Image (spheres, grey):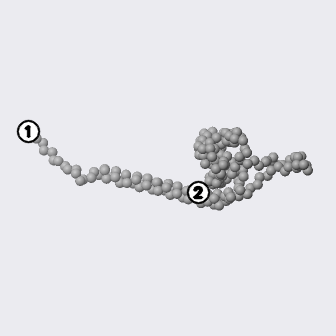
Amino acid sequence: MEPINIPRVSTVGKPYKHSMHKSTQGTKKRKIWKWIFISLLAFFLIGCTWAMIWINRNVYQKLPDLSELKNISFSQSTIITDRNGVELYRLFDENREYVPYEKINKHMIDGIVAVEDQRYWEHNGLDTVGIFRAAINNVLHPGKLQGASTIPQQFIKNLLLSSEKKIERKLKEMILTKRLDAVITDEIKK
């Protein structure tokens, strides 16, 4: 018997009909994903631009000047004395008396810091650890809201801003707190 001679067919350089379909299909998918990515990027950039314009109009342009802090006088008690200087009465809406920082007892300062802002000596006005902790807690436990305001933030809110619960007020508070930290005396921030 003679061996069967099978003709050899070369496939080198000849694309398969099926593989040509796959490559055009892959190109279409890449184009669709590229279009989706570019669209999302455009929406993101438009959103960031809008947010920056909104913050500039509603926050930065309406900030009070911190240089006013040096000129603020707090209401204090009116003291009525007799002709010898002996105190007879105090008239007040809120009983306040100015005390210079160096005359405040160290234990009083430590107590306020322990209750109001435990990381006061570690942060620069804004407690990012506290902000993230409060944000996570508020998402996980919506009924038990936590705050993360530091002593400087509370000072800014009570002295220069209102207590309204709006994003503009909170952003103003954060910006002014950072500015306050830049001008706060070495006497307080050791």
Q: Quadrant of residue 64?
A: bottom right
Residue 115 lies in quadrant:
top right
User: Which residue ends up furthest to the left in the rendered image?
Assistant: 1
Whether residue 76 appears in this view of the structure is: yes
Mark 2 sits on what residue? 51
Secondary structure of residue under mark 2: helix
Amino acid under disc 2: Ala
- Residue at screen point 12% across, 42% down: 4
Q: Which residue is painted at 66% across and 49% down in the image?
A: 187
- Locate residue 91 relative to residue 178 in the image: left or right: right
Measure the alpha-carbon separation of dots 2 and 1: 87 Å
| Residue denoted by label 1 | 1
- Residue type, mark 1 in image: Met
Is residue 94 or residue 19 the one in the foreground?
94
**Dot placed on the residue nearer the N-terminal end, 2 or 1:** 1
Query: Taking 9 as reference, is 55 above or below it?
Result: below
Residue at x-position 63% and y-position 44%: 120
Indicate the position of residue 85 as horizontal and vertical percent values.
88, 49
Q: In the image, 155: left or right of 80?
A: left
Spot occupied by residue 154 in the image (x, y as percentages of width and height): 69, 48
What residue is at 13 percent from the left and 44 percent from the top? 5
| Disc 2: CA contacts within 10 A as few (<14), some (14-19) or many (>=20) | few
Left or right placement of residue 43 versus residue 155 in this view: left
Q: Nearer the viewer, residue 175 or 106?
A: 106
Few, some or many residues within 10 Å of mark 1 (<14, 14–19, 20+):
few
The foreground one among 112 and 176 is 112
Closer to the camera: disc 2 or disc 1?
A: 2
In the rendered image, the residue lying farthest to the right is: 83
Q: Nearer the viewer, residue 140 or 55?
A: 55
Which labelled disc corresponds to residue 48?
none
